[in-house]
Amino acid sequence: MDQSQQHDSLISLLSANSQWAEDVERVEPGFFEESAKGQAPHTLWIGCADSRVPDNVITGARPGDIFVHRNIANQFSLNDDSALAVLKYAVDFLGVQHVVVVGHSECGGAAACLNAAQNALFTEDGPVVTVPSLSPEDPLNRWLEPLTRLAGSLHLSTTPKIEALPIVVEENVRRQVENLCKSATLVNAWASGDEKKKSVWVHGWVYNLGTGRLRDLKVTRGPTA
């Protein structure tokens, strides 16, 4: 494959962007000029990095509606400075009203963790190597360890994967909602006298790749929930 062929996909992206910008400006003159003045998103989306789950596209949202943090398997770790900084900025500086954790069906990260947890050698209190071909200290293995331990705690070792994976995906979303609610940013917001910060709500959703539909897991948490 020559260099021109390797870059065809990127050229296509740039071309599509140019057409999109022209179309938006024609339909809504001045949109980009207004957008450049600042943002006021109503929602922080914490989702998976999977390329099939683009937040703005599947929700029909406009640029500026959703502040986004994505990683492998939509996890929110209380020792992850990147996620903590995003949450802090979204709540304290942008004033978002909602924080939504969004998992999805057929999640590769969740599937890898389930496979590791269903391995006969897995023990809940032993060392965890989710991707055996990588070093235990590889960033991917370190990142996936909490989810692998969660999958192991669900006792799905004899459950067929087609049934087990949706359980892991949903329980992962629930766990990340719990983690968010333990964060200093939300604990302080809910305890503050600032009415806007006190009204932040945390939700858990799952996106079905096969239908294109989002489903609310009904695990919403807030200052009085």
Image (cartoon, rainbow, N blue to C red):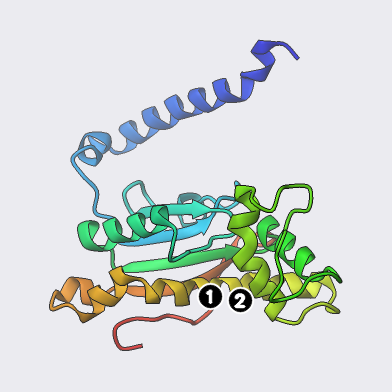
- State left or right for residue 104 relative to residue 67: right
- Compared to residue 131, the image places residue 200 above or below, namely below
In the image, residue 216 lies at what x, y percent?
Answer: 52, 75
Q: Amino acid at mark 1?
A: Arg
> Which disc is residue 175 wearing?
1
Residue 199 visible here: no
Q: In percent of the image, x 67 and y 57: which residue is there?
A: 109
Number of dots carrying numbers: 2
User: Residue 17's image quarter?
Assistant: top left
Give the camera-side residue of 77 and 9: 77
Residue 56 locus on image (x, y percent): 45, 51
State the mark number for residue 171: 2
Can you give x and y, in whole percent of width and height, for residue 11 in the image? 55, 20
Closest to the observer, 20 or 99: 99
For the C terminus, the quadrant is: bottom left
Label pair 1/2, CB-CB below 8 angstroms: yes
Give the structural element (helix, strand or loop) at label 2: helix
Tell me the residue at 71%/71% (across/down): 126
Q: Amino acid at mark 2?
A: Glu
- Marks 1 and 2, Cα distance to the nearest angstrom? 6 Å
**Looking at this rendering, what residue extends furthest in the bottom direction?**
224
